[in-house]
Image: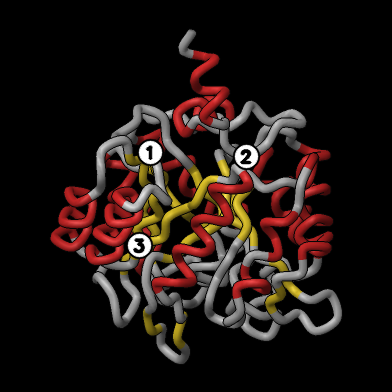
Amino acid sequence: MECDDLIINFTPTGMIPTKKLTSFVPISVSEIIEDSHRAIELGITMIHLHARDEKTGVPTPDAAIYGKIIEGIRTISKDLIICVSLSGRNFKEFKQRAEPLQLDGDLKPDMGSLTLSSLNFNNMESVNSPKMIQSLAQEMKDKGIMPELEAFDAGMINYAKYLNKKGILEPPYYFNLLLGNIACAQADILHTGIMINDLPEESYWSLAGIGQSQLKMNALAIATGGGVRVGLEDNIWFNNGRTKLAKNQDLIARIHNLAAANERKVMTPAKLRSLLKLKSGNGNYGRQSTLNKLEQNK
């Protein structure tokens, strides 16, 4: 579904960037919170978090670290939509991948990422078996957490429709469409159009570009009524010539400039919460229950 207002989904860290690659990537809890603070001040709608081990800097599913990050962000903004990564790149067991979903109360995430198939990146794989995808989706449904659906090609969108038929996923949906990965849909208008056209009804979507495709896909999304996913997770460079390393705030500021040129306001977290049927924030996080929906329709 197209929106007048622009969804900005901020991805500050990811699993790949290191301090050796760029000093600007936030790794520690305090760094991620500080970059999130700057992003909130500039204006974002939601945030997609990855946690890192505080001693080694390597990715971790540790709920305690996620909890510290979420706590810090929510002292700054109590309604920002927070998504935790459930990635299959480094973690293979369900218990590991589902650990951040066990957070509750003021630390409960609103969303958890759900990659809809296995895929290869340049130098590693992300394994997402049907059993794993369905187990993570069911765990989120049971805990009232909304899946952030990650699709790297059109087949993954078809799998989301399959999960809907099985009763594991339910609308409204939020999709990140990620283009430009070497083994998946490429960052061009044809692939993008096919994926958008294949989305189920009641879908809200953002475009992401891998590496130097980030700006191109963000600009296309802004021009065509979609949202954007932006941050150092997907691209550490500010320019395609790779002569200037990016800072997260610079990437977000550029999105604001493009949005202004296209006369699109940044969507508030409160508005997206309403569209996605999420709880209101400010101490109430996650997805509204079926009971709440029925009560609201009385």
Q: Is 12 placed above or below 79 here? A: below
Residue 253 shows up from this direction: no
Q: Position of residue 243 (x, y in %)?
A: 49, 77
What SS does tag 1 mark?
loop
Q: Nearer the viewer, residue 213 or 141?
A: 141
Determine whether label 3 and label 2 are within 8 Å by CB.
Answer: no
Residue type indicated by callout 1: Pro
Work out how far the residue at label 3 is from the one at label 1, CA to CA, in angstroms.
16 Å
In the displayed structure image, the side of residue 8 where residue 172 appears, left or right: left
In the displayed structure image, the side of residue 5 where residue 68 appears, left or right: right
- Number of labels in the image equals 3
Q: Which residue is mark 2?
A: 286
Q: Which residue is mark 3?
A: 151
Q: Which residue is mark 1?
A: 171
Q: Is 109 placed above or below 6 here? A: below
Determine whether label 3 and label 1 are within 8 Å by CB.
Answer: no
Marks 3 and 1, the one that precedes in the sequence: 3
Which residue appears farthest toward the bottom when viewing the image? 123
What SS does tag 2 mark?
loop
Residue in the picture at 38% in, 77% down: 118
Marks 3 and 2, the one that precedes in the sequence: 3
Q: Position of residue 208 (x, y in %)?
A: 39, 59
Residue type indicated by callout 3: Ala
The 10 Å Cα crowd at callout 1, few under 14, some 14 to 19, many 20 or more, is: some
In the displayed structure image, the side of residue 227 where residue 248 appears, left or right: right
Q: Position of residue 61 (x, y in %)?
A: 70, 70
Q: Nearer the viewer, mark 3 or mark 1?
A: 1
